[in-house]
Each structure stands twice: as structure tokens, then as C-alpha cells.
Image: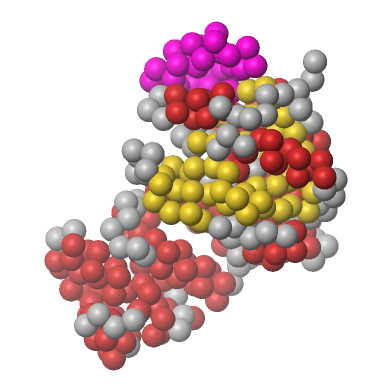
Amino acid sequence: MIPAVSVVMAVFNGARFLPETLASLQAQTMRDFEIVIVDDGSSDNSPEILRAFAQAEPRCRILTQTNQGQVSARNLGARSAMAPLIAWLDADDIAEPERLQLQRAHLEAHPNLAAVGSSIRTIDEDSKVTATVPYPTGPSNVAQAMRSGSALAHSTVMMRREVFLGIGGYREALLHAEDYDLWLRLLDGHDADNLPLPLVRYRMHGGSLSFRRRRQQSLAAFAARHCAAERQAGRPDPLAGRSAPVGDEIFKELAVGPERESAFRMECLAAALHPPGQPLEESWLGDNVLRTWALRSYLPRGRYVRRCLIPYVRRMWAHRRWSESLSWLARAVYTQPLTASWRLLGGK
């Protein structure tokens, strides 16, 4: 008997939050689904948790592989899925009880759609709800929003398996933005939508990839947008067939000029520094500050000082890196003295 939906999860050392995630699947109001979980070589007690779950849950299948990363694990899960619809769920997130039922009904009622997501509630490490985050609704609004960032939250997406396989699945080259790249390629010939209800609780914590690997994530997102623009212009995808994850060399490889690179780096830096106090990879942060300084002639001085330099000065001061803080303060004052002084006094 073929199930209506395959829930696909990739797990790597997810023992801390895994039981709550699995329990949310057993609480679904819809019953006609399977659960395909790929254990990506976990070294904690995730395998024991998964084995116990599979023994008690006949709809669950566990696949194992040596640690190859989430791109490989997700692709394996999707290829192994039996249902025509795939519902993604990350191993630390929580699906609301009506999630699968509502999304399946929406896709059945709208055969033009290849994928549907939803709004989310963010939760902390203790599963306390911290915010409700809306996502754009309506295919045209989703497509427009996707030009600047992901308009689908990965753990909320249910999509047609044939579409996923047809566009080639996730790409290793766009590691840590592989979902954003997938949505952009999906939109080349299909529509996507979001339900306005928050159907997933999305966990924010210090171990999240968005915190630990922000460098790779931001570069991959930039490359994904560039590739989408090339395809829309009728040119070949410049990363087609590439397997190695993109790095800083991507600007030269894609022949991206200093204007686009400087604007991209400034926005990444501003996002990383606001709100203040976010856990960041310090080497990434330092490299981007230095690179934006080298490209400062292409940046609006006031905005650069306001959104990047002064927040960085404050961060270095808070970390007791006094000399570095004072050095960058001097550069900020040199670049735009009035803006720097105003921001230091608390102006916006």
C-alpha cells in the first residue's frame, strides 16, 4: 500500500531534540503517511532513539549511511520515499498536529502547485515559543520574495516527489543554502505557496547551522541567486555539475563585479550584527569586515558606518577586544564622522 505522504528527515547527532520531533509526527491528525529517516552516521545515542521509535511505529523506516552531510542524507531519503508527496522536517523542529492533513489537502486542491509551506513559530532550546513568523502567501508573492531570500521555511515544505527528482534534488555545491537553491530551481517551471497558519515550530539554538556555518550559508545563497538569474536570462547554470561547495572564490569564478560583491557582503555583515550578541563564527565576521573595508568605495558611507562599522565596534568592545574596537572606531569616524558619532550616542 503506497502512503499518501512520506515525511523525510535527516538526522546527525540529534538526540537532544529528536524525541519531541518524533512525537509530533505520531500526533498528526492525518494517518496515511510513512516516515523515512536517514541517520547520517550519528555518534550520539540518536541510533538507539531511532531504533526504539521504529520498533513502536510501523510507519517508520530507518536508513543509515556514513557521515556524508545533510544534502546526501536528504537526497537519499527522498529517493527512498514511496509516496507522491514529500514533507520535509528537520530533526529539531516540531510539526503541529494538523500540518500534514492541511498541506496534503491544499496540494490536492491546487494541482498547479509543486510545493506548499507555511508560517512558523520559533522556539528556544526549552521549546518555549518566542515569536510567530509569517511567510508570503500566494504563488506570485512567494516568487517575488524568493528573489531576495528564501520564502519557504524548509521544515514546513511539502512538495511533489516527481518535481524534486525532476529538478535534480539538493545540490552539494550550495551547501547550507541547498534548500533555497532547490526552491529557486523549482520556481523555474512551477509554482509554490504558503499556508498562513504556523504549522511548524522551528527551533532556534546555538547549534543551528545558521549560526555555526554562516559563512558558507551566505556565500551559497548569493551563488544560488546568481545561478537563478543566469537561468532566467536563458544562459546555462554556471554551477551545473559542480559538487564542491562554493567558497570565497565564487566571486571571481562567476565574474561578479565589486559593486555586487560589496553590496552582498555589507548586507550579510549587517544581518549578522543585528540583533547584537548573536553567536557567530568570529573568523567569518573578521574576514567580512576586512573585505567590506577594502570595497568601501563602492558602498554608501553613511549606511556602511551605521549598519556595519559601529555595530562591529560595539561587539569588539563587549568582547573586551579593546584595541580592535578602537581601531575600527577610528575608521568609522574617518569614513563618516557625523553618522559614527550619532550612532555611538544611540541614534538610528
Between residue 152 and residue 340, name the one nearer to us. 152
Q: Which residue is situated farthest in the front direction here?
A: 29
Answer whether residue 240 is visible to the viewer in this image.
no
Relative to 255, 17 lies left or right: left
Q: Say if 164 sits above or below 346 in the image.
A: above
Q: Residue furthest right?
A: 111
Q: Give 232 or 150, whichever is nearer the viewer.
A: 150
* Residue 294 on image: x %, y %: 40, 73
184 displayed left or right of 12: right
Rendered position, 8 above or below 208: above
Residue 4 occupies which quadrant of the picture?
A: top right
Residue 25 among those drawn in magenta: no
Q: Quadrant of residue 32?
A: top right
Residue at 70% in and 47% down = 116
Residue 173 against residue 90 in the figure, above or below:
below
From the viewer's perspective, tell me whether residue 171 is left or right of residue 19: right
Image coords of residue 82 (percent x, y): 76, 23
Q: What residue occupies the far top of the structure in this picture?
A: 55
Which part of the image, by quadrant, shows the N terminus?
top right
Q: Residue 239 at x, y = what percent?
A: 68, 50
Q: How many marks?
A: 0
Magenta-drawn stretch contains 53: yes
Q: Give the colouring mode of the picture.
A: secondary structure
Q: Which residues are magenta?
A: 37-66
Name the residue at 72% across, 29% down.
Answer: 5
Residue at position x 14%, y 66% from top?
322
**Quarter of the image where the C terminus is located:** bottom left
**Residue 107 versus residue 302 in the image, above or below:** above
Residue found at x 57% / y 72% = 260
**Residue 28 shows in this picture:** yes
